[in-house]
Image (cartoon, rainbow, N blue to C red):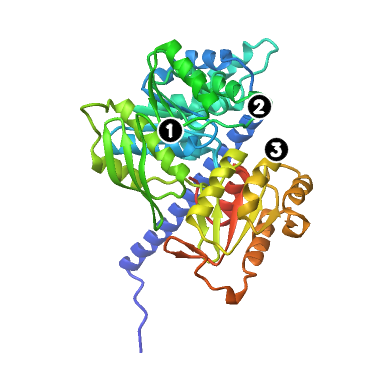
Amino acid sequence: MRRPRPFGPDRVATGRRELGTVGEAKRQQEAEQRILADFRAVEAELDRRWPESRIEPTLTRIAALVDLLGDPQRAYPVVHVAGTNGKTSTARMIDALLTEAGLRTGRYTSPHLQRATERISLDNQPIQPARYVEIFREIAPYVAMVDAAQAGQPALSKFEVLTAMAFAAFADAPVEAAVVEVGLGGTWDATNVADGAVSVVTPIGLDHAEYLGTELAGIAREKAGIIKPGSIAVLAAQDGQAAAVLLERCAQLGATVARQGLEFGVLRRTRAVGGQVLRLQGLGGAYDDVFLPLHGEHQASNASVALAAAEALLGAGAGYQLGADVVRAAFAEVSAPGRLERLRTAPLVLADSAHNPHGARALAAALTDEFRIQRLVGVVGMMRDKDARGLLEELQPVLHDIVVTTSSSPRAYDVDELAAVAVDVFGVDRVTVEPRLADAVEQAVRLAEEIDEDAGLADSLEVGTLASGGVLITGSVATVGEARALFGKIEA
């Protein structure tokens, strides 16, 4: 018979430790809840300002704010990234390369997928909610001063405040280099109070027509505004009109030009399990056997742009090359959440934040080139200011069916209006409507699994991966962000 242990000093001490552990865990949980409550309060306050989707052609307010803050954006060299598509992926790659080269980095991107803290990263990691709140509170008195000086004119916008928060966080860290993504356009974007030592322009296409217009040359002119005197301009391959505008700007300002396809580019690309293996021509020479854990020719192109940008900042060129091991290690660790991201394997569920025809075209090409799926069903939710017909027409050839849905964003496309466009493009028999995203994904999975059992599985392979039926969630960053949350993905 087992006798109970005497209730002596040892058991008293053990009990105290256990109670202490429970009490400590409770206090930590309460502290975390307070931090998240403060974070939500800051977000609510920022959301009362002009939304990011609304811009005004002036830098007066943001210039006044950073002046009061001591011009933090001048405390470190900046790689400034503009373009229509590929900006965030390219920015993340540049960040990875600079980090692997030994620099302490800051990265500012937009919009976020799940939480606003994703926008401001230090050393390739999003800042914590507590730090986000702290930065906001530190600059809040200066924000109030600029607001008060507007004399009936619009106060600082949400994006302007966020941009100042990022610049301040980088200066406070301090970082040795910052990678800064343009929010919208270029010339009049709040980030353009920074003078990029390296200005990157990714492929330019039509988007944000209500602000940037529908003429490619005009859009290119707006984006070329980030190129500054004496800087190095790293230019992705462009349509002829856009290229002419960018080169004219470089010539006017005496900027050094590096052009994809001439000074740098992708020499070879081979599909591989989980991504692709590249041979890249950089400014300092060729780099072999570079594994990139991302899918699509467009990501290979982004990688070559990112490499040239990092080389430009670090001074690589004739006679000096980055270490091949540094380049390989950096690209091997790159991630691009929400960019042909695998959310589930069986059945295969992919998510991609393509939100305009240009991005959808690259997505469709990647799906055709790298995935062989018998029945791919799209779940599409878009913003009402986007070219729904253009995007759906690009995706129609690669999708068997489409489930139209919506996100929680106040800018979301009305589900019935989007469904009407989808019916025009796909035909009524291929369109299903599910207003709730969770229901839409569930319905898409059911449709994807309706495959003829005798059809065989050989036609449904991504390199090394079996996927007889699959689901693609796309149409907007908001839709993809909510899908990531549904599948338990953490903030990126």
The residue drawn where x is 49% and y is 53% is 369
The residue lying at 62 percent from left, 10 percent from top is 149
Q: Residues within 10 Å of mark 1 (few under 14, many from 20)?
A: many
Q: Which residue is mark 3?
A: 411
Helix, strand, or loop for circle 2?
A: loop
Q: Is residue 127 at all visible to an observer of this figure?
A: no
Outermost residue, left side: 319
Q: Position of residue 138 (x, y in %)?
A: 49, 25
For marks 2 and 1, give the one nearer the viewer. Answer: 2
Can you give x and y, in whole percent of width and height, for residue 338 in the image? 52, 47
Instruction: Give me the C-alpha separation between circle 2 and circle 3.
Output: 21 Å
Kindly identify which residue carries mark 1.
107
Residue at left offset 45%, top offset 43%:
299
Instruction: Quadrant for residue 213, please give it.
Output: top right
Are the residues flagged by discs 1 and 3 in contact, CB closer than 8 Å? no
Local SS, label 3: loop
Using the rendered view, name the quadrant where residue 60 is placed: top right
Q: Which residue is mark 2?
A: 214
For disc 2, the neighbor class at 10 Å (few under 14, some 14 to 19, many from 20) is some
In the rendered structure, which disc, 2 or 1, sits on the residue that comes first in sequence?
Answer: 1
Among the 4 quarters of the image, the one containing residue 465:
bottom left
Q: Quadrant of the N terminus?
A: bottom left
Q: Tags 2 and 3 in contact by the CB under 8 Å rule?
A: no
Examine the rendered structure and indicate whether residue 277 appears above or below residue 213: below
User: Residue 33: x percent and y percent?
Assistant: 54, 46
Q: Amino acid at mark 1?
A: Arg
* Amino acid marked by disc 2: Thr
What amino acid type should be assigned to the residue bearing mark 3? Arg
Task: Assign a secondary structure to mark 1.
Answer: strand
User: In this view of the protein, can residue 134 be seen by the observer?
Assistant: yes
Per the model, the C-alpha gap separating discs 1 and 3 is 26 Å
Residue 161 to residue 282: above or below: above
